Structure formats: structure tokens, C-alpha cells
Amino acid sequence: MEPGAATELSAALAAGAARPAMWRVLVDGLQEFRHVPAVAAVLRDGPEPAPHGGTDLARGLVAAAVADDRLAGLLRRWARAVNDGPAERVGNHVGGTTTVHGSVVQAGEILGDVHIHVPAGTAAGTPGGGTAPPGAAPVPRQLLPPPEHFTGRTDALAALDALLPQLDTRPLLVVVNGPPGVGKSALVTHWLHGLSDRFPDGQLYADLRGHLPDTGAGPAAPSEILGRFLRALGVTEVPVEPAESAALWRSHTAGLRLALMLDNALSAAQVRPLIPSAPGSLVAVTSRRRLTALGIDGAAFRRLDLLSPGDAVDLLARRIGADRVGREPEAADEIAALCAGLPLAVCVAAARLAARPRHSLAAMAGALGGTGAARLDALDLDGEHAVRGALDASYRQLSPELARGYRRLGLPPVTVLNGPVAAAACAVEPEEGDRLLDELAEVSLLEDLGTDGTTGLGRYRFHDLVRVHAGQLAADTEDPEERRDTVRRVVDHYLATATAAEALLTPSHRTLRRDYAHPPSHRPPFDAPGAALGWLDAERDHLMAALRTAAEEGWHATAWQLADAMWPLFLRLRPHELWVEAHRIGRAAARRAGDRRGLSRMLTSGGVGLRNAGLTDEAVEWFAEAVRGARTDGDRKAEAQALHGLGQSHLLAGRLDPATEHLTAALALREAIGHHRGAAMTRICLGDAALAAGRPRHALAPLARAREELLAVPDPYDAARALAFLGLALARAGTRHTSGEDGEALLWQALDEFTATGSVHWQGRVLEMLGEISAERGGTAEARDRYARSLALYGPVSERDAARLRARIAALDARG
């Protein structure tokens, strides 16, 4: 801009600022330049100029216009309107012999923005100059067609919509990532079609080819996409040099509001040169990778989750018809479950069904229920490996080391992985296991579940079909012996870690031998009893899977040893079904291994589980077998243990005479061999038997002595059990402890001790005892409250105990 022109423009601006109507017109026209600091200052002042007048504002605007030809053009047109006449005629008066070209708006008053879409390449629209020929390119609308059967995704769309206000201040960059086939492109396409009015200058699309099957083309270079986008906007001469084309792209898009969909991105470097420079533009990126490096550019990241079971069935119904799904609703649910929420899998299954209208949904569910390659083959379309192909494309981009880790991690019988498990599977150090998991999550072959609050370990999960794919690749490429060793290393990892937890939680429980094919060298992920119990609880399903696998593979010693190592889990948390199953497998395995000590342990520990599960007759059989075996072996300690369990089983069944007989024999034998802790445990049972016989005073001495002996061991868990029974006996006997406390006070103390040890079952049992005391003395409301608290604890861990509590509460309600 010439110096004289700048002076004249400043004078016109100062004069116009004194006329509110004229100033309002200028403010409206400046809206599209709100990213310019000087313009932003004007807009903050609103329709009226700041008190200091128009001179300072004029200087700021003129200075900005020197660097921006389009802003300078707007100011000149406004200045001419100021000089031509009254404000009432601004925008409606064409003076002299002026000729108007292009689009014209003639109106008395306009409230809001007016957008004139000038064909790209014209002098006004292209900073590089040039004139568009007749029939210039239309505003580009390149998005893929909207998905015909888009389903669900309400939360994901709401999360994306919540980002839109950022468009007012800067270009918005959004990265939607997730595993192959999860529907990233469908989601973004659906979302952007609903926003077309927000982007009057166009919507551009490019497939960056980050995850396509081998075509020889490779991932798209940014310069390739820049050239395509610039030509779509009417630029006919695109520089060959990438830096020049990127600079032209930034200049050309500086005043435009565009939406870009960059599909299948491989890296941040592919995306970064394509980001427009102006506020009001949106770049939506889809990728199987997390593309965390784009965080430097202010990207917002949204991981796309799997479809819910209901949405998966809805998608199936949209594609094959609701009537067909309605005729076989259970089969439809099974198909959705077997597709595990992966939209690509649901769509493939639906396409196969749509092409076979006479085939039942049950038949498709049966095909999907296969294992290994059969399950993936059921998701092929006319020879095209739809799901397998998508996964193969991701797999081919892995480094050899990462590809080997992917294959091996598909073999162990676990659904959630962490660093130590990955390290065991891949025979590497735990830190290397963490790195492998993180890199597989980066390319969305694993889902990052966050950090475990108990152990501090990162947790990752395979999608069901991805795990099948990894396992099948291992079957195709790995040596059978190596596959077997991979699984054995993970099973040994679980045995070693559970044994470490057992040593912390039940140090008095005699640890039997452990047989490792691959002795683990890592430290357990816990160093305190609470963390050890938390690990056992969180890993119970994986421990059981490892145990079942050991039995199936013929690793008999490992199978019964895993059942033995899980003892603290069974004792403290009472998962009765798992307790019984583990020991039934363990008993059979110990027999096959010919290990008599292992068999004895399985019979006695398993007998406790059977008894607590209400299977008292079977428990009696197991303990009787244990007594016979111990006498054959001359093992007096094992015999005492079996007699103790036999007495407890009869006690629970209400057979008090044989219960007392066996418990008395067990006590005598334990005292004879100097097994003081065992003797204390038997005294607890004798006290319980006296309570059941209605003789609470006879229970006081054995229970008080048991409490003292167990505190001396120390065994805080069983000492709390002795205290609970002692409190109940004192309350029923109507007397006080030697310390002066009554029975109820001791029960509350026992509740605190069980809370400290993490035993939910015994917390519920003590509250039940407190409820019994309240009910016996007529405190109905108090008893109901305590029973209700007990029921809340029993509910998740023992349906049998929960049913008993519900019956107690119902009896109180009936009594009124």
C-alpha cells in the first residue's frame, strides 16, 4: 500500500468512526478477519468505537491491512462509502459509471454474516493472482457418501460436537483412532456430512493410504495430497517443491473455512503439512495409530470404542431386515456377541446373510463360533478376506520383532495383558514387555485399558477377533514347540506370582513344592498383603484359565500347584464355584502325577470348598478319603487336618455328635504332634459346635485360648475368626470378657480386623452375628439394619449366604 493511500485510508477511518451507523457496517464486514489482532481489538469494542476515538483504531487497522490485501480491499470499499454519502446508503448505492461484476447483495439492513462464494482462482480469492476461466471449479464437496446404515455412536458424536466451539479461535484438529474395522471412517464421514453448512468453502477428502493392502503405491506423501487439494480449490499451477506447495496451501486457505477428512493416516508427518492456517477450518484424521505426536499441534484425540451389543444387533437388523432378526432374536444376539462389537465383522456377517435369504441366523452363528482360521473364514466375502485382510494390513507394517510379539501374545489363555505377562510370553525382560504392549496399542492392535490401581501395571486387551488373528499367525509361522513354550512360560508366571501372594497372605499355610519348566526371574507386582489379595482377585479368571490349560496340556504338577497357590483367594473372598472347580481339576491332576502330598492337599483344601459351597456330603467323602490316605502314609499331621475337615463338614450339616467326635480326635492328634496353630483352629470349631448345641458357656474357654494362640503365631485372619465366635458366645452367655468388654464390642472389633484383612465374606458373617444378637434381644429395627448391611456384602460373593440373609429379613418383616 502506498504511503499516501495509507494516509487517506486513516483519515477516512477516523471520519467513519465518528458515525455509529457507518462504524457498525465496518464491524460486520470485519468478522471474517477476527483472527487478526488489530481486528480483534475493534470487534471487542463492538458497534461503537472506543472512547479514545477512531484515530488509534484506524492506525491499527491500516497497519494490519499493509500485510493483507483482502483486508485492505475491504477497508478501501468502506472508505469510499464514507466519502460517497450518508450511512443509510452504504451497501445500497453504486455511484458514477461503476460496473459491478460477480455476486451482489443489495439490502437495507443485514443482521449477521454474509458469505460470497467466489470461484477459486479469481483475483479476489487467490492470493497468488490469476483469473478463473468461465465455468470455474465448484466449491469442492469430496466427502465419501454418508454411511447408509450408520448405527449408534451417540456418545462418540457428542464428544466430537463438544469440540466445535474451538473453531472460533483456531483450526480444529481431531484424531479419531481405533482398531481395524471399528468404524472410524464411517463415524467421521457421518459427522462431517452433518456439518456441511459450517464450511462454505468446501469439504476435502484424502485417503492417506496408511493401512491399505500392498498395492505398490505406499502411504501418500503430503505433497501429493496438497497438489490434489489445491487443484480442487481452483489453483491450476501447483509448485513441484513440497515446501513451496505447503506455503501456497497456507496462503490460499488463510481466509477460507474448510473441512478436511484425512483417512487412514500413518504418521503425524503425513498430516502436519495439510493443516490450514485459519480459524474456522476443521481437520478430522482417522488412523489405526494413536498419532500422539500431533498433540504438539493441539490435536484432540478420540478413541472409537466397539459397538454395544444392542447397537450391533441394530446394525444387523438395518442390513438384513428387522423381521428376519425378530424371528431369531437369540441367534442375532449370538452373532453380535461373536462379532464382539466390531462393525466390520457385523457388516460382513450381514452381507453374507443378505445374499442368502434362506439361510438361518443360527447357521451363521454356528459358523462364527468356530475356532482359529474357521472363525475368520466365516467373515470372508466371495473370497475376499474382509476382516482378516484389514488385520493383515496392520500386521504387515510391524517390525519383525513387534510382529513376533504380536503372534506370541495371541497364544496365552489370558484376555488382559500386562508387562510381566508379555515378558513371559516373549521371553524378554518386563520393561521390554511394556514396550511391546505400548507399541501394539499405538497401532490399535491392542486396546490400552489404563493402569491397574492395585499393582500399578499397564493393562491391555486384544479384541476377540484380533486375538484369533494373532494366534492363527502364530500357528502358521511359529514352531509347535515354541508355541507350547510360550504358553508354558505364561502359566509358570501365574504359578510363581500366585505362590508369592500365598506366602504373603497365609505364611502359616505350608507351601508345597513348585515345579517350573521356565523359572520366572521377575519380582511379583506387590509387596504387601493387601496388594497381593488385590492381584489374586483381579487375576482370578486368568489363574483359572492357566490352571485349565495346564490340565489340558498334561502339565499335571502345575495344575494342582496352581489350585494350591490360589488358597488365599478361596479362603478370603469365597468364590465357591471356582474353588470347587479348581480342586476337582487339581485332585485329578495330582492323581495323574502320582503326587500323594499334592493329592492330600487337594482333598482337604477342596473339601473345605465343597463344604462352604453347601456340598457337605461330597465334602465328607473327600475328607474321609484324605483320612485313609494319611493313615496309609503314616502322616499324622495330614490325618489331623483331614479329621478336622471331616468334623467341620458334619458340623455344617447339623450332625453335632459326629462333628464333636472328629474334632476332638483332631485336637488330640494336633496337640500330640505339637501343631499349636492347628490345635487353635480345631478349638474354634469346637466352640462353634458348642454354640450350635445351645451351650455358649462351654464355648468360651476353647475360643479364648484359640484367640491367644493365633495372635501368637501370628495369624491375624484366623485370630479374628476366633474373636468373632468369642463375641457371639459372650453375648449369648450374658457375660463379659476378662478385659471387661461385652460380646457385642468384641464383634465390632472383629469386623474391623476382617476389614483390615480384606475378607468380605467374614465382614458379612460378623454383621450377621450382630443381627442375630439384636433379634434375640428384640431389637427388630436394629437387626434388620445389620442384616441388610450383611446382605450387601454377601450378595456379590455368595448367593447361598445371601439367600439365608434374605430369609432372615423376611422373617423379621413378617414378625412386624
Image: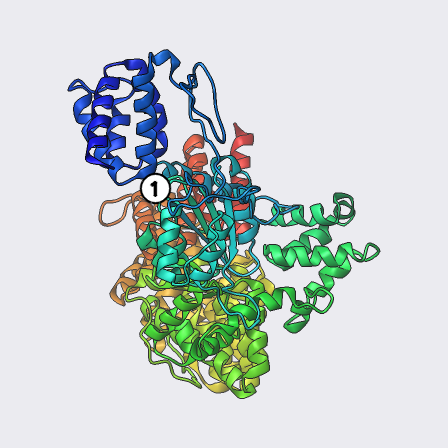
**Residue at (50%, 55%) from the top-left corner?**
228
The image shows residue 766, relative to residue 112, as above or below, that is below
- Where is residue 528? Give x, y as percent: 28, 64
State which quadrant residue 711 falls in.
Answer: bottom left
- Where is residue 180? Give x, y as percent: 54, 61
User: In the depicted view, which residue is nearer to us: 711 or 256?
Assistant: 256
Locate residue 342 relative to residue 281 in the image: left or right.
right
User: In the depicted view, which residue is nearer to us: 739 or 497?
Assistant: 497
- Where is residue 2? Give x, y as percent: 23, 36
State which quadrant residue 703 falls in.
Answer: bottom left
User: In the depicted view, which residue is nearer to us: 58 or 31?
Assistant: 58
**Residue at (28%, 14%) from the top-left corner?**
20
Locate residue 733 relative to residue 467 in the image: left or right.
left
- Where is residue 673? Give x, y as percent: 35, 78
**Residue 686 visible in rendering:** no
Other residues around mark 1 within 10 Å, as few (<14) / some (14–19) / many (≥20): some
**Farthest residue, direction right:** 358
**Residue 133 visible in rendering:** yes
Locate residue 339 relative to residue 542 in the image: left or right.
right
SS label for mark 1:
loop
The image shows residue 334, relative to residue 812, as above or below, that is below
Task: Identify the residue position indicated by label 1 in the image.
Answer: 170
Looking at the rendered structure, the kind of residue marked 1 is: Arg
User: In the depicted view, which residue is nearer to us: 210 or 606?
Assistant: 210
Locate residue 508 relative to residue 640 in the image: left or right.
left
